[in-house]
Amino acid sequence: MSSSHDTVAQTVRVEGARILATLIRTVGDVQIAEDAVQEAVLAALDAWPVTGVPPQPRAWLTVTARRKAIDILRRERARRGKEEEGTRMIDLARSDLPTDAVVHDDLLRLIFTCCHPTLSPPTQVALALRTLCGLSPAQIAGVLLTTEAATEKRLTRARQKIAAAHIPYRVPPADELPDRLPAVCGVIHSLYTAGHAPVDGAAVFDVDACAEAVRLASLLHDLLPDQPTPTAVLALLLLTEARRPARLDASGAVVTLDCQDRTRWDSSAINRGIALLNASLEASERRADAYQLQAAIAAEHARAASYDDTDWPEIVRLYDLLVSVAPSPAAGLARAVATAEASGAATGLALLADLPPSPRWHAVRADLLAREGRYAEAVQALTESLAGAATDSERRHRSQRLAELRRLT
């Protein structure tokens, strides 16, 4: 791939959602805005290898997307004989570019539009992953554990519903926030999860997606600084992101928590995350929700000077609460791991028996079986986990561990 194509890809990854958000506000139509941005990207791929990358790639894409939107609106007006697009075309023809503050507001509007209560929770997540994160329908299908065709239909219906119902593109008034906030928080957390566990098999982390989710969480917290749940979401993301630099070695291989160099953890992000968690708990009068509990677990790991210093009984207690508040296979699996650390591998294996199998479940089971000296069973379990390894680095890590276990059988 040429350097100009690399620049287009990088600009779209970092700036695409911001360009799209502002264009949706002006055009008032998600599909037209998406089509215009896509046409602008194609124009960049054609022009930049010849003319060179412009000094301000985002500005070039923004202006080009506006022009493409005007072309689309003109075609629509001619086809339908409609005139009301005139005002929108006047706005699109303006030469000024939106300020960062305006772009931030547009992104918040886009989040709340994606999370309108008339859309189902899976549709909210799918629409947000598409518009905010730029994931393909195939990637979204992997996150939602559905098919690409079903995801395409879901996205099409969502856009049609937004247009037909005239769902407003705005941050809702204060009296509507309580009904919308859980979905918004869930979408931002899903965006981070999609970046933290990419589904394309290529890399372990999508750094841009993770950073974007943290930034959106910060915007939401700034909008609602006294609300405990947005504060907890930001705390959770900061505490999780703080450990990312130590999760891979220089060759890109996975480094497990017990072997990580904790001096590489981001101490400023940890300190801010813990402070936000405490503020969130105080705001909720110490009645913790799922995000607060997950952040509290991350804080326990962050406080430990070494793996051996980890307060595993406290982490088990927090996971017990999390499973009671928001039961999920992922929470149950993490609880089994923590229980094995606190009370022994046999206890962890007993908890695993009550959970649905998955590639990660097989990998955890293999580790616990190996601790019990049941190496042949561990080899079988780890072999099964390889079929569903999400990334190349994860697959290499499990394959290396498998070779070690085979030598022990």
Image (cartoon, rainbow, N blue to C red):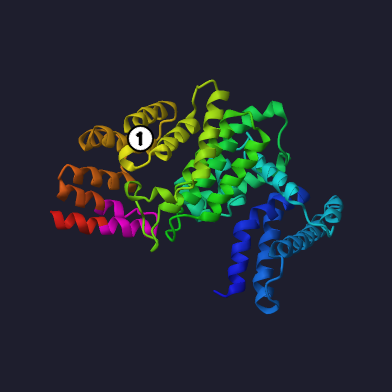
Q: Quadrant of residue 294?
A: top left
Residue pushed farthest left?
Answer: 409
Identified at 35% across, 35% down, the residue is 332
Give the image quarter of residue 390: bottom left
At 53% from the left edge and 41% from the top edge, which residue is drawn?
189
- State the quadrant of the C terminus: bottom left
Q: Is 389 or 99 nearer to us in this picture?
A: 99
- Kindly identify the residue that appears in the image at 73 percent across and 65 percent down: 60
At which x and y percent is residue 281? 53, 26
Instruction: Tell me: residue 125, above or below residue 328.
Output: below
| Residue 98 colored in magenta in the image | no
State the extent of the magenta-drawn residues as a range: 383-400
Question: Visible in this render: residue 290?
Answer: yes
Label 1: state its secondary structure: helix
Q: Position of residue 150 (x, y in %)?
A: 51, 49
Answer left or right for 328 relative to 47. Answer: left
Residue 280 % position (x, y) = 55, 29
Question: Quick check: 122 above or below 195?
Answer: above
Hey, what amino acid is under mark 1?
A: Gly
The answer to which of 15 and 249 lies nearer the viewer is 249
- Using residue 37 as the reference point, say whether residue 359 is left or right of it: left
Residue occupied by mark 1: 332
